[in-house]
């Protein structure tokens, strides 16, 4: 369960390519040619052009002022006195500010425990976060930790959630950037509580190369070695159906991690995978919920 980055990808811009040279104007130039040449001065260029930004959501860089214009020569053709020409100012690159608190797209769903209830920390590595820019799919995961999780205690759930976040913030993506924070947007524990993870305004880090527009929902536990609780699957069905209605996501766009072509993983574990196949199928709980409340999403 990786993600991708960005992320912000490139917080600094550098200044390069400053050049100004009109000293080679010859004395025998005509008045017209000198007027044309006198307007050529230094150019300011930015390292990292827009064509290198991707749909993953790199934020725009620092806005730079236009390069200063050189004085127009309106006299008769003479040798330009380079000693009196003003030099373009050297601009100091400024960092792009770290993103402030973000509100989830469309607001935090009803009944979700806000992030501030389990951590007071902001994004661990804000320079690598990227904006979500809308959603169109949902991916289901398990945490896959070596130790199965059976507790229904709120405190135990928070401890496991914190440990997942700590592990994720030490990981790096393919570009060598540390993950911005916990990779999932929502986490469901054994008792059916839903926690806010990474704010939904930002792309997660849960399906490699496919995090853009993709909501990550984690069920606590290792479902290769255990089965999800009934409270957990009931809440998963209702919560995912609510997300689908809120964001107009059809049932065909609700996947498990292993169902992505780019993925090579057992996630969400064989037992949750079997449940997801049933609940999305004809007569399954998630499909029935949609049929009763918004059948257009079954298409």
Image: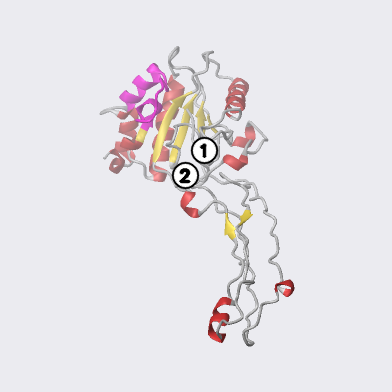
Closest to the observer: 250 or 20? Answer: 20
Closest to the observer: 279 or 160? Answer: 160
Task: State the residue position of label 2.
Answer: 56
Q: Residue at x 41, y 32 (%)?
A: 139
Q: Quadrant of residue 255?
A: top left
Q: Contact (CB < 8 A) between labels 2 and 1? A: yes
For residue 238, above or below residue 49: above
Q: Residue at x 43, y 42 (%)?
A: 213
Q: Which mark is residue 5?
A: 1
Q: Secondary structure at mark 2?
A: loop
Range of residues picked out in magenta: 255-279
The quadrant of the image that shows the C terminus is top left
Closest to the observer: 214 or 243? Answer: 214
Q: Secondary structure at mark 1?
A: loop
Q: Is residue 59 magenta?
A: no
Q: Residues within 10 Å of mark 1 (few under 14, many from 20)?
A: many
Classify residue 288 as left or right of residue 247: left
Mark 1 or mark 2, which is nearer the start of the sequence? 1
Q: In x, y percent, where is residue 132?
A: 48, 45
For residue 74, above or below residue 44: below
Q: Quadrant of residue 159?
A: top right
Classify residue 94 as left or right of residue 110: right
Q: In x, y percent, where is residue 236?
A: 43, 29
Q: Residues within 10 Å of mark 2 (few under 14, many from 20)?
A: many
């Amino acid at each position: 369960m990786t993600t991708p980055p960005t992320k912000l990808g490139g917080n600094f811009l550098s200044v390069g390519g400053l050049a100004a040279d009109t000293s080679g104007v010859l004395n025998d130039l005509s008045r017209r040619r000198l007027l044309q040449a006198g307007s050529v001065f230094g150019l300011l260029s930015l390292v990292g052009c827009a064509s290198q930004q991707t749909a993953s959501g790199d934020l725009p860089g620092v806005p730079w002022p236009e390069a200063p214009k050189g004085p127009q020569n309106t006299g008769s053709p003479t040798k330009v006195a380079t000693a009196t020409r003003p030099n373009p100012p050297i601009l100091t690159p400024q960092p792009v500010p770290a993103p402030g608190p973000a509100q989830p797209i469309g607001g935090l769903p009803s009944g979700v425990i806000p992030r501030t209830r389990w951590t007071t920390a902001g994004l661990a590595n804000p320079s690598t976060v990227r904006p979500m820019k809308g959603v169109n799919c949902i991916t289901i995961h398990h945490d896959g930790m070596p130790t199965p999780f059976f507790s229904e205690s709120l405190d135990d759930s928070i401890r496991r959630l914190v440990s997942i976040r700590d592990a994720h913030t030490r990981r790096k993506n393919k570009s060598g950037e540390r993950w911005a924070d916990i990779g999932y947007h929502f986490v469901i524990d054994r008792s059916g509580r839903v926690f806010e993870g990474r704010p939904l305004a930002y792309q997660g880090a849960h399906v490699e190369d496919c995090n853009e527009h993709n909501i990550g929902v984690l069920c606590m536990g290792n479902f290769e070695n255990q089965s999800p609780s009934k409270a957990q699957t009931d809440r998963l069905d209702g919560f995912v159906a609510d997300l689908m209605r809120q964001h107009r996501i059809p049932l065909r766009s609700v996947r498990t991690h292993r169902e992505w072509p780019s993925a090579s993983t057992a996630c969400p574990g064989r037992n949750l995978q079997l449940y997801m196949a049933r609940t999305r199928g004809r007569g399954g709980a998630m499909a029935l919920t949609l049929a009763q409340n918004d059948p257009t999403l079954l298409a």
